[in-house]
C-alpha cells in the first residue's frame, strides 16, 4: 500500500498492497499491516493478479526499514506492482 499511495496510483485499489512473509512480520506496526491466514494471503494474491498487477518477490531492505523491522533478513516481500510504482 505505501508504494501505491506514495506514487498516487489511481489505477488500482490501494488495498491490494504488498504481502510480507517471515518471522519479522511480528515487528510490523499494526497500523501498517495485519496478520492473515494463508488462505487470506492467497486470496489477496489472486485478487491482485486478477486486477492486472504483476507480483514479484524479494528481500528489500528498504521495506524492512520502512516497516520498523529490526532484522531485514527475516522479511520477504511479495510486491503487487503497478506501472506507477514500478521503481522497485
Image (cartoon, helix red, strand yellow):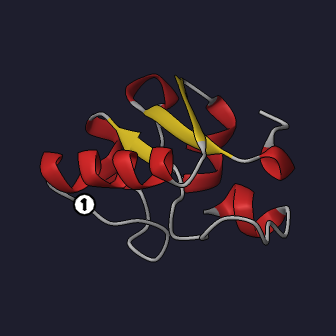
Q: Position of residue 57 (x, y in %)?
A: 51, 25
Q: Is residue 29 above or below residue 67?
A: below
The residue that appears at 21% across and 59% down in the rendered structure is 36
Q: Position of residue 61 (x, y in %)?
A: 63, 30
For the N terminus, the image quarter is bottom right
Image position of 77 (left or right of 82): left
Q: Which residue is mark 1?
A: 35
Q: Position of residue 64 (x, y in %)?
A: 56, 41
For the C terminus, the image quarter is top right
The residue that appears at 38% across and 45% down in the rendered structure is 45
Q: Position of residue 32 (x, y in %)?
A: 49, 69
Q: Quadrant of residue 34?
A: bottom left
Dot 1: element? loop
Image position of 47 (left or right of 2): left
**78 vs 23, nearest the viewer:** 78
**Residue count near mark 1 (Cα–Cα under 10 Å), binned few <14, some 14–19, many ≥20:** some
Q: Is residue 9 above or below residue 59?
A: below
Image position of 3 (left or right of 69): right
Amino acid at each position: 500500500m505505501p508504494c501505491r499511495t506514495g506514487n498516487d496510483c489511481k489505477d488500482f485499489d490501494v488495498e491490494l498492497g504488498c504481502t510480507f512473509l517471515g518471522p519479522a512480520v511480528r515487528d510490523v506496526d499494526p497500523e501498517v499491516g495485519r496478520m492473515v491466514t494463508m488462505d487470506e494471503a492467497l486470496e489477496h494474491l489472486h485478487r491482485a493478479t486478477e486486477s492486472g498487477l504483476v507480483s514479484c518477490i524479494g528481500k528489500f531492505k528498504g521495506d524492512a526499514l520502512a516497516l520498523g523491522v529490526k532484522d531485514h533478513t527475516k522479511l520477504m516481500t511479495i510486491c503487487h506492482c503497478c506501472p506507477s510504482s514500478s521503481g522497485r
